[in-house]
Amino acid sequence: MKQDRIYRPAPATLAPKARKADVPEAGVGEDWLAHFAAGTVSAADLQTMELPHHALLLDRWLGESDLGFVFAARGVGKTHLCLGFARALAEGGRIGPWRALSAVPVLYVDGEMNAEQIRERDKALATCDGPLYYLNHELLFARTEKTLNLARRECQEALTAHCVALGIRVLFLDNLSTLFSGVPENDNDSWEAVLPWLLHLRKLNIAVVIVAHAGRNGQMRGASRREDSAAWVLRLDDAIDAATVKRGAKFVSMFTKPSRHTPTEMPAYEWEFAPDTITGRCNVTFREASGLEVFLQWLRDGLDTCGDIAEAMHASKGTVSKLATRAKAAGRIQTEHRKYILTDGNETPEK
């Protein structure tokens, strides 16, 4: 039959060890054949056809339909920064060095903090009205007696419909551990229960920012496959001295997976979120992080040679060697067999 000739390769084209069970039955996949034919374009047509445009939303790194992760150890400042992102996006304003290109509707789904804390932090960061919405686990249970679990398909579908109804352009999920109950963190295959939903949101032009925890090794905790589909990954490292009484947050932000939207390197920044007990405002300051602190952070992450650190920092070996010399003079590292080793020195590095 003609279908046999289409779907059953001739014996000469089969691999030597191909089994009969590996060959599709006649007629299987007919619908997909039509779909593939409709979805295939020539290179020439690709250059001239009108394509969907995915606009940038925040500076040159957060765009429509992005999937991104912000991760850090507990208490470093993940929620502080992401609430700042949400406010800037909804107001069309600025957070640190990054400006929103326009005001867009934002939904912040919170699975950890109580509603009063969220209200206080939002008020401290707000500068004007904007289309920012909160779905807080505590308020949801108080009003409906429902527990938020985005590992369940019915919750995913309902939240998608809710986003569409509100016209949401950016969805924050804070955080991975509390919102996706029953998904083993270290099992790559379990992430498949979540990924199709996230990819569907991408098709709807909804950017998703997921807040996650860092593991003991300094990397994002859990299955590595989660980062494969991410447009960017942002890590925060605590910058508060051990002797300092912590109010607010002070940390260094660094992209461990650069944004696909820009070919230029995004610098690391040192941030401080300082609440004012008198005015109730949160003062946000930032500065570009010193190269020395970035160098030391890569050491904490397990890199210990000049070449590896130079590659990670997108810097020359000469630059890394000079940073190592400064770190050694400050008592922060020592060298052994051409490898850098962190010490217990507490001297403040020069800027």
Image: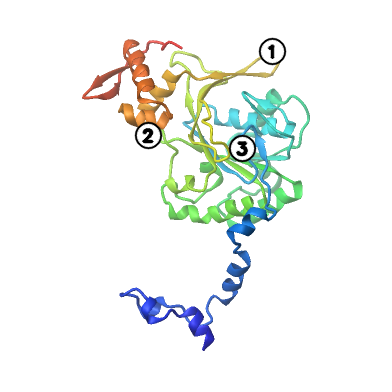
Q: Mark 3 and mark 2 in contact (Cβ < 8 Å)?
A: no
Mark 2 belongs to which amino acid?
Asn
* Front residue of this view, candidates 127 and 140: 127
Q: Earlier in the sequence, mark 1 or mark 2?
A: 2
Q: Which residue is mark 1?
A: 278
Q: Sequence-wise, which precedes: disc 3 or disc 1?
A: 3
**Residue at 30% across / 28% down in the picture?**
305
| Position in image of residue 233 (x %, y %) | 51, 38
Query: How far, Cα to Cα, is label 1 from label 2?
Result: 39 Å
Label 1 sits on what residue type? Ile
**SS under mark 1:** loop
- Mark number displayed over residue 48: none
- Residue 155 seen in the figure: no
Amino acid type of the residue tagged 3 in the rendering: Leu
Q: Residues within 10 Å of mark 3 (few under 14, many from 20)?
A: many
Furthest toward the right, the residue is 129
Q: Is residue 210 shown left or right of residue 326?
A: right
Q: Is residue 56 visible?
A: yes
Task: Report helix, strand or loop for mark 3.
Answer: strand
Q: Position of residue 130 (x, y in %)?
A: 76, 33
Q: Nearer the viewer, residue 333 or 32?
A: 32
Residue placed under numbered mark 2 in the picture: 217
Q: Measured along the vertical axis of the image, is residue 233 above or below residue 145?
A: above
Label 1: how many residues lie within 10 Å, few (<14), some (14-19) or many (20+)?
few
Question: Residue 276 location, x and y as percent?
Answer: 65, 15
Is 18 situated left or right of 157 in this image?
left
**Residue ID at (71%, 28%):** 93
Q: Residue at x 37, y 18 (%)?
A: 323
The residue sitting at 53% across, 44% down in the picture is 230
Is residue 292 shown above or below 229?
A: above
Q: Which residue is mark 3?
A: 62
